[in-house]
Amino acid sequence: MSMGMVRNGLLWCTIINYGILIVWFLFFLLPHEWLYRLWGAWFRLRPEQFDALNFGAMALFKLLIIVFNLAPYIALRIVG
């Protein structure tokens, strides 16, 4: 496997993961009440807890994208 293939793989993983993050954010932003009612049927959450849980999970997901996809891609671009 060449360095270029690894770089392209990391780049596409970053793009796909950021796409998932954007869809998650839009799904959280636009049908917020519906999503809260859906989750409220499974878990007992107040709206503040629901918002904090989603924003915390989005922040963690974004951090993991940066650490495991974007940073290695940038490092390989600099080295190669």
Image (tube, helix red, strand yellow):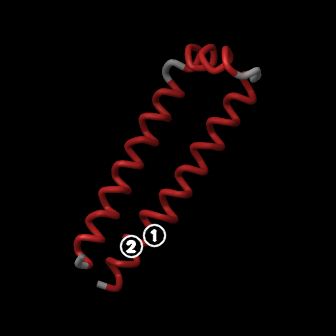
Assess whether mark 1 and mark 2 are in contact (beta carbons under 8 angstroms).
Answer: yes
Residue 64 place in picture, x, y as percent = 54, 57
Residue 60 place in picture, x, y as percent = 60, 51
Residue at screen point 35% across, 78% down: 76
Estimate how packed mark 1 is, as few (under 14), some (14 to 19) or many (20 or more) residues with alpha carbons within 10 Å: some
Q: Which quarter shows the C terminus?
A: bottom left
The three-letter code of the residue at mark 1 reads Ala
Q: Which quarter shows the N terminus?
A: bottom left
Residue at screen point 35% across, 48% down: 16
The quarter holding residue 41 reads top right
Residue position for label 2: 74
The quarter holding residue 45 reads top right
Residue at screen point 61% across, 43% down: 57
Residue 53 place in picture, x, y as percent = 68, 36
Residue position for label 1: 71
Disc 2 from disc 1: Cα separation: 5 Å
Indicate whether 12 appears above or below 35: below
The three-letter code of the residue at mark 2 reads Ile
From the viewer's perspective, is 44 left or right of 13? right
Name, please, the residue furthest toward the bottom.
79
From the viewer's perspective, is 72 left or right of 62? left
Q: Residue 9 carries which label?
A: none
